[in-house]
Image (spheres, rainbow, N blue to C red):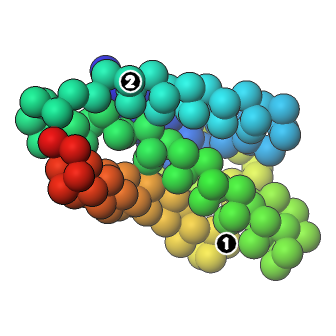
Amino acid sequence: MIVLLSIFPIFLWTFIHPQGHKLLRNPANYIAILVLTLALLIASATSFECNLKAFEKRNILAPISLLAFLFLYKLCDKLCIKKYGRHMFFSVRYNSVWQDGESDESTFFESILQMLLIFAPLLVWQGLSWLILQCIDKYNC
């Protein structure tokens, strides 16, 4: 369940409904989602036990991916503001259901950033969870 709550928003905002990322532009919404993500990470970390299987331990740390997504989104948005003088536009060329004028103006660079926002949080989650679990196994369990 934690994995679903952590991974689904990333795919929701990038693949399923790309216009949904616009709510992250509002600082109040961004902070609220960041706080919820941190609460999810803390709640999942409290369920950690040494006798869990390795994949269960890794899944407990899944909110790291959503946290990485939020930080990377803010970084990519700031890059687009600096480069284009506007917020980042997500491309929806592959999505026939959701269309808007903003996505028609997205550039190749923004498409690359969008792909980065899809795959990098998953890699960060796997890398950090491996590192954290190695440290825990070495010193605690």
In this rendering, position of residue 80 left or right of residue 127: right
Q: Which sits earlier in the primary sequence, circle 1 or circle 2?
A: 2
Q: Residue at x 66, y 36 (%)?
A: 34
Against 76, residue 57 (above or below) is above
Tell me the quadrant of the picture where the N terminus can be found.
top left
* SS under mark 1: loop
Front-most of residues 57 and 118? 57
Q: Residue at x 23, y 52 (%)?
A: 139
**Amino acid at circle 1:** Thr
Front-most of residues 119 and 46? 46
Q: Residue furthest front?
A: 139
Characterize the local packing of mark 1: few (<14), some (14-19) or many (20 or more) Cα atoms within 10 angstroms: some
Q: Kindly identify which residue carries mark 2.
A: 46
**Amino acid at circle 2:** Thr
Tell me the quadrant of the picture where the C terminus can be found.
top left
Residue 127 x/y as whole percent: 32, 61
Residue 125 x/y as whole percent: 37, 52
Against 58, residue 126 (above or below) is below
Q: Quadrant of residue 29?
A: top right
Q: Which mark is residue 58?
A: none
* SS under mark 2: loop
C-alpha distance separating marks 1 and 2 = 42 Å
Residue 71 x/y as whole percent: 63, 54
Q: Which mark is residue 107?
A: 1
Against 77, residue 69 (above or below) is above
Against 10, residue 108 (above or below) is below
